[in-house]
């Protein structure tokens, strides 16, 4: 079953210089429980695609469906969005930060509060309910941000470079941790990243976008690597072969 369907989506917007094409006939289907990464040249429109799925902007042409329902330019609670920064409020406790999404969505029922608290307990934050974000490591903060997103039970997670603010060693550990949680919870995820290695490590499939106006240039299925843990994938010979292929497809001038 397709949790996300993007059908021939194009986006054109006005600038002082005239019309600019951002996306051109982009189509993509993502199945329930699948982890898909978007990679492409800087400024090609990766984050724009996430904004369209979230209903924050409308496409000029085409349709987007989440769990069979048309998005149609309306932000809905079926979509959870993780940004480049964790966006935790420093004056709220960890528990209260996690509850924020439920408050905003007006879904703070006893059942949902219990579900959110159980997520914190399940993923190692039982002793941090009354702590504040400044008392946590960068990795723990990202875990809290993910649990806050999961708390209102979205059907798809949109991840916009969520590890970019972390140092390399922490990034490896945290990205693996976040991927494990997403898979354990059976969620569908779409990750935007500039890091080809990260995409190969975490994904079931990788979508390569062209320069603007973005089109789908290639889609790579990770095949047997799907069952290999993220950090272990990096030592496999097929990892480097796929990295080189995607690098060539990106056509990056350095």
Image (tube, rainbow, N blue to C red):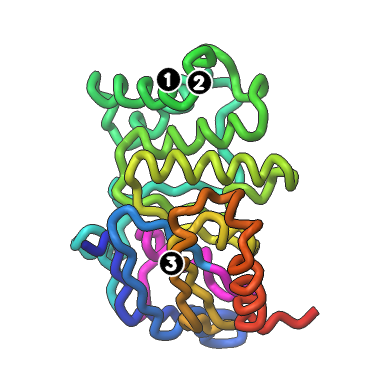
Q: Earlier in the sequence, mark 3 or mark 2?
A: 2
Q: Is residue 241 magenta?
A: no
Dot in front, 3 or 1: 3
From this view, report whether residue 66 is shown above or below residue 168. Answer: below
Rounded to the nearest angstrom, the CA distance separating label 2 from label 1 is: 5 Å
Looking at the rendered structure, which numbered label has been put on residue 18?
none
Per the image, label 1 sits on a secondary structure element best described as: helix
Per the image, label 3 sits on a secondary structure element best described as: helix
Quarter holding the C terminus is bottom right
Q: Are marks 3 and 2 in contact (CB under 8 Å)?
A: no
Depicted 63 relative to depicted 97: above or below: below
Q: Position of residue 55 (x, y in %)?
A: 35, 60
**Depth order, front residue of 13/153:** 153
In the drawing, what numbered circle is on residue 121?
1
Whole-angstrom CA distance, mark 3 to mark 1, is 33 Å
Q: Which residue is mark 3?
A: 223
Q: Nearer the viewer, residue 175 or 157?
A: 175
Q: Secondary structure at mark 2?
A: loop
Q: Earlier in the sequence, mark 3 or mark 1?
A: 1
Q: Residue furthest bottom?
A: 18
Q: Indicate the position of residue 72 as horizontal and vertical percent values.
A: 27, 66
Q: Residue furthest right?
A: 254
Q: Which residue is mark 2?
A: 125
């Amino acid at each position: 079953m397709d949790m996300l369907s993007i059908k021939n989506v194009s986006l054109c917007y006005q600038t002082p210089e005239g019309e600019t094409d951002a996306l051109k006939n982009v189509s993509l289907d993502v199945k329930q429980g699948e982890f898909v990464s978007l990679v492409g040249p800087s400024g090609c429109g990766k984050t724009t695609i996430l904004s369209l799925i979230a209903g924050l902007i409308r496409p000029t042409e085409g349709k987007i469906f989440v769990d069979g329902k048309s998005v149609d330019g309306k932000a809905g609670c079926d979509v959870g969005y993780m940004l480049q920064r964790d966006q935790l409020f420093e004056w709220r406790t960890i528990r209260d930060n996690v509850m924020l999404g439920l408050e905003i969505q007006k879904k703070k029922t006893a059942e949902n509060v219990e579900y959110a608290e159980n997520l914190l307990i399940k993923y190692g934050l039982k002793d941090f309910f009354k702590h504040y974000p400044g008392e946590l490591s960068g990795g723990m903060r990202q875990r809290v941000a993910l649990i806050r997103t999961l708390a209102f039970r979205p059907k798809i997670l949109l991840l916009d470079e969520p590890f970019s603010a972390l140092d390399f060693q922490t990034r490896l550990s945290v990205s693996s941790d976040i991927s494990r949680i997403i898979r354990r919870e059976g969620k569908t995820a779409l990750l935007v990243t500039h890091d080809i290695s990260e995409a190969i490590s975490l994904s079931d499939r990788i979508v390569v976008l062209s320069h603007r106006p973005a089109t789908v240039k290639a889609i790579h299925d990770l095949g047997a690597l799907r069952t290999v843990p993220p950090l272990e994938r990096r030592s496999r010979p097929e990892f480097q072969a796929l990295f080189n292929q995607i690098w060539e497809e990106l056509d990056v001038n350095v």
